C-alpha cells in the first residue's frame, strides 16, 4: 500500500513539474525583441530600455550578427502598460551618464501591424549616438 501511494505521489509531482515547465517556456519570447545596430558601444546587459523616454525594460543580450557584421541587441519589455511595438518602430542608442553608459530608446511606431515577439528591428530603423 505504501509503495502505491509513493508511486502516485511521484507521478503527481512529475505532472505538476511538467505543467510548470511547459507553462514557463510558452511565454519565453513574450515582450522580447531584437534590434540591429551598426555599433553596440556603451550598451551592456541589464542596461535600460526606454520607450518614449520612460523606462520599460532592459537589455538582455548583445551578440554579433556575423553575416552583416552588425550588433544584435536583445531587449525585453517588462513593465506593464507599454503594449507591443509596431513594424515601423525606431530605436536609438543614447548616452545615459557621463561615464559612458548608454541605453536604448524606442519610439513604438504607428503602423497597424505589430512586430511579433522575437522579431528584429532592422538597422535602417536604428541609430547609434557615438561620441
Image (cartoon, rainbow, N blue to C red):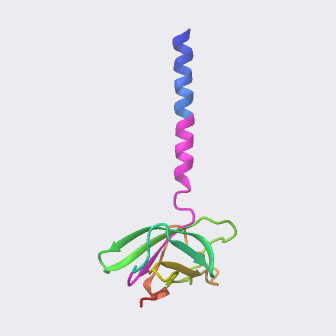
Question: Which residue, as the protein is rendered here, is positioned at the far top?
Answer: 1
Q: Is residue 80 left or right of residue 13?
A: right
Question: Which residue, as the protein is rendered here, is positioned at the far right?
Answer: 81
Q: Which residues are magenta?
A: 16-39
Q: Position of residue 95 (x, y in %)?
A: 50, 84
Residue at 53% over, 46% down: 22
Residue at 38% over, 84% down: 38
Classify 31 as above or below 52: above
Q: Quadrant of residue 68?
A: bottom left
Residue at 56% over, 8% down: 1
Q: Position of residue 78 (x, y in %)?
A: 60, 64
The quarter of the rendered structure image containing the C terminus is bottom left
Q: In front: 101, or 84?
A: 101
Q: Is residue 115 left or right of residue 74?
A: right
Q: In front: 89, or 37?
A: 37
Classify 91 as above or below 115: below
Classify 28 as above or below 16: below
Q: Position of residue 117 (x, y in %)?
A: 54, 67
Q: Position of residue 87 (x, y in %)?
A: 56, 80
Residue at 61% over, 80% down: 108
Question: Which residue, as the protein is rendered here, is positioned at the far bottom?
Answer: 131
Q: In front: 59, or 34?
A: 59
Q: In front: 101, or 88?
A: 101
Question: Which residue, as the protein is rendered here, is positioned at the far front?
Answer: 98
Residue 24 colored magenta? yes
Residue 25 colored magenta? yes
Q: Quadrant of residue 9?
A: top right
Q: Is residue 81 left or right of residue 118?
A: right
Amino acid at each position: 500500500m505504501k509503495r502505491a501511494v509513493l508511486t502516485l505521489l511521484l507521478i503527481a509531482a512529475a505532472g505538476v513539474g511538467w505543467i510548470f515547465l511547459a507553462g514557463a517556456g510558452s511565454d519565453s519570447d513574450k515582450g522580447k525583441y531584437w534590434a540591429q545596430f551598426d555599433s553596440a558601444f556603451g550598451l551592456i546587459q541589464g542596461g535600460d530600455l526606454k520607450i518614449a523616454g520612460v523606462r520599460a525594460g532592459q537589455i538582455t543580450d548583445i551578440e554579433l550578427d556575423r553575416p552583416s557584421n552588425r550588433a544584435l541587441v536583445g531587449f525585453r519589455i517588462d513593465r506593464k502598460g507599454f503594449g507591443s511595438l509596431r513594424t515601423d518602430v525606431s530605436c536609438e542608442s543614447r548616452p545615459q551618464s557621463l561615464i559612458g553608459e548608454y541605453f536604448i530608446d524606442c519610439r513604438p511606431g504607428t503602423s497597424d501591424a505589430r512586430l511579433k515577439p522575437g522579431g528584429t528591428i532592422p538597422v535602417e530603423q536604428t541609430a547609434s549616438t557615438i561620441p
